[in-house]
Amino acid sequence: MRKEEAILLAEKIVSGTATDAELMQYNRLFNAFQEGDSWDEQVLGDKQQLEETIRQRLQPVLRRRRSAKLTGWPRWAAAAVVVLLLGAGYYFLQKPQPLQPQAVRFRNDVPAPAGNHAVLTLANGQQIQLDSAGNGTLAVQGQVQVSKTAGGQIVYAGTAEAASFNTLQLPSGSKPLAITLSDGTKVWMDAGAVLTYPTAFQDGKREVFVSGQAWFEVAQNSHQPFRVTSTTNNATIDVLGTTFTVRAFRDGSHMQVTLLSGAVKVNTGTASQLLRPGEQAAVDNNGAVQVAAGADLQQATAFKDGLFYFNGADITTIMSELQRYYDIDVAYQADVKDLFVAKIPRDVPVSQLLNLLEMTNLVHFKIEGRKVTVIK
């Protein structure tokens, strides 16, 4: 990339017309600005002069943008994926405060989980560590066989005369896990989720109990309605055959139900709301239910697709997600008010996602063992 190409690229970034490939180029340029040993002076010229030229060229565009509404002012950054920051400046327009080099602050890194570390508790109290369990039959309970496939999924098959319950728990620091219940319903569980369910469904009803984040693809059976009960707030979700996600962690945040297809009814002790595809229900701690149309379905199912996807999330929400997935401790030395949108695969070390957020120059981090500190 030559000097004039770098200036043109910066203009496209600010105007929101850059392609994904150009956003990736921007990331390389951004890293070059921060890392002196990778700066090619013969091609790009003097770093300070180029920085000042870019700043001058961007000012007219930014003055026009500042007079528009926030929704018309996207600001982009990228690193093999796209990162969008709402309501922030660029590196070229807002110089960073004195800070230790990232190489020093990120000297200790935390890798992505290598397994799901799931624990399956059978009806008799026996616990099976699924990471170390071999493929094939794990247990037989009555006439129900529990198996582990070569892909790591858990499958229930068979019937039973007496009801007995199993519990599947994914601790923090776990990869998502898929399970197929005895009726054919499929559930994808995220790190920190717990699912309790009968080995086989009886008496004309199907009911499971969940906390954390899970994605449900319910097998249709009009003679045997399906119910999901949240163990965090006792709210219930009644379905026939449908696809939806539940997010209900024990961290004080609201429970969320996002409907992808079919229909569900969200019930609390004080309210009941029917959802249509594309709608999302938020249940507060008092049992009130608010329904919003136009839910971000990609965000709701990102964990199942192996992605982190934050769409206008604050730093506390983002760090809570990283805390569960990477099994890290989080400390705050700064109060960051900005909202971020980021998309990145989940199979990367935590430093790669933190690096994307740092590209906005509004927040920085320090990694010490399994502790991540948010700094300004």
Image (cartoon, rainbow, N blue to C red):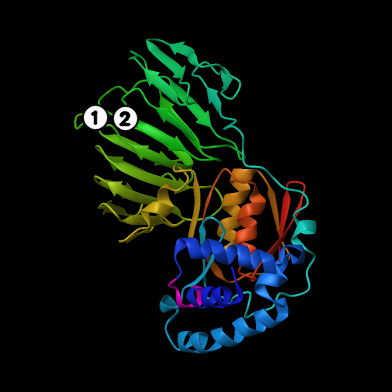
The picture quadrant where one finds residue 106 is bottom right
* Residue at screen point 78% across, 63% down: 101
The picture places residue 139, in percent across and down from the top left corner, at 48, 13
* Residue at screen point 49% across, 48% down: 307
Q: Quadrant of the N terminus?
A: bottom right
- The answer to the question of whether label 2 and label 1 lie on touching residues, with beta carbons closer than 8 A, is yes
Q: Which residue is mark 2?
A: 206
Q: Is residue 14 magenta?
A: yes
Up/down of 244 relative to 147, above or below: below
| Label 1 residue SS | loop
- Mark-to-mark CA distance, 2 and 1: 6 Å
**Which is the main secondary structure of the residues drawn in magenta?**
helix
Q: Is residue 158 left or right of residue 104?
A: left
Q: Nearer the viewer, residue 168 or 94?
A: 94
Q: Which range is magenta?
A: 13-17
* Local crowd size for mark 1, using a 10 Å CA cut-off: few (<14), some (14–19), many (≥20): some
Q: Which residue is mark 1?
A: 224
Q: Is residue 263 magenta?
A: no
| Label 2 residue SS | strand
